[in-house]
Image: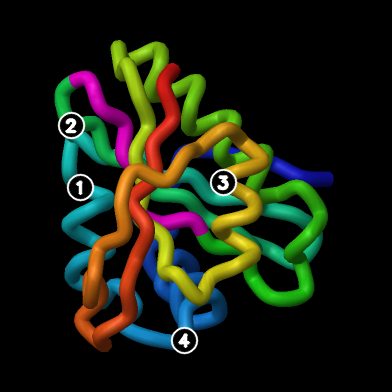
Amino acid sequence: MTVIRKATLSDLRDLCTIERRCFERKRFSEDHMRWLLENPDVTSYVFYNEDGIVASMILMRLGRIGKVISLGVAPGHRRRGIATQLMALGEREMRDCGAASMHLEVGVTNRAGIRLYEFLGYETVRKMPEYYSWGEDALAMKKPM
């Protein structure tokens, strides 16, 4: 059985574990993750299955913009449609909150992420040189709602 639900502060440890499993570099610290969970402009989701929490998504409302802060699916659970399900839910949530568009940044070396976002209708707005603290460039992507 799979369940997608809003994350709460009680999920903090599991969210930090997903961060470590999904991202090789510069993951959110526990303090930053706590701040996100307590921020009224942020909505976080977790995806549960028989293995526990295997994916998460963090969204922020910035006026009429919905922003994907983080989307991660644990290795071994990728390419099963989990990220697509989370994105669809997040887009609905942001639309219901009055967002006119969704925005995100993705590392230029994250080919799977770029393909996913393009498949979901996101278009590259611009390349952002050295966007990440470790020097990697990112693509800024956008989708009208």
Q: Are marks 1 and 3 in contact (CB under 8 Å)?
A: no
Q: Residue at x 64, y 64 (%)?
A: 112
Residue at 69% x, 76% y is 75
Residue named by callout 1? 38
Residue type indicated by callout 2: Leu
Mark 1 lies on a secondary structure that is helix
* 4 or 3: mark nearer the eye: 3
Secondary structure category for the residue under label 2: strand
Q: At label 1, which amino acid type do we have?
A: Glu
Q: Which residue is mark 4?
A: 24
Percent x, y of residue 34: 23, 61
Image depth: mark 1 or mark 3 in front: 3
Label 4 vs 1, first from the N-terminus: 4
Q: Which residue lies under the disc numbered 3?
A: 117
Asked whether residue 69 appears in the rendered view, the answer is no
For the record, the magenta segment spans 64-71
Q: Residue at x 64, y 54 (%)?
A: 115
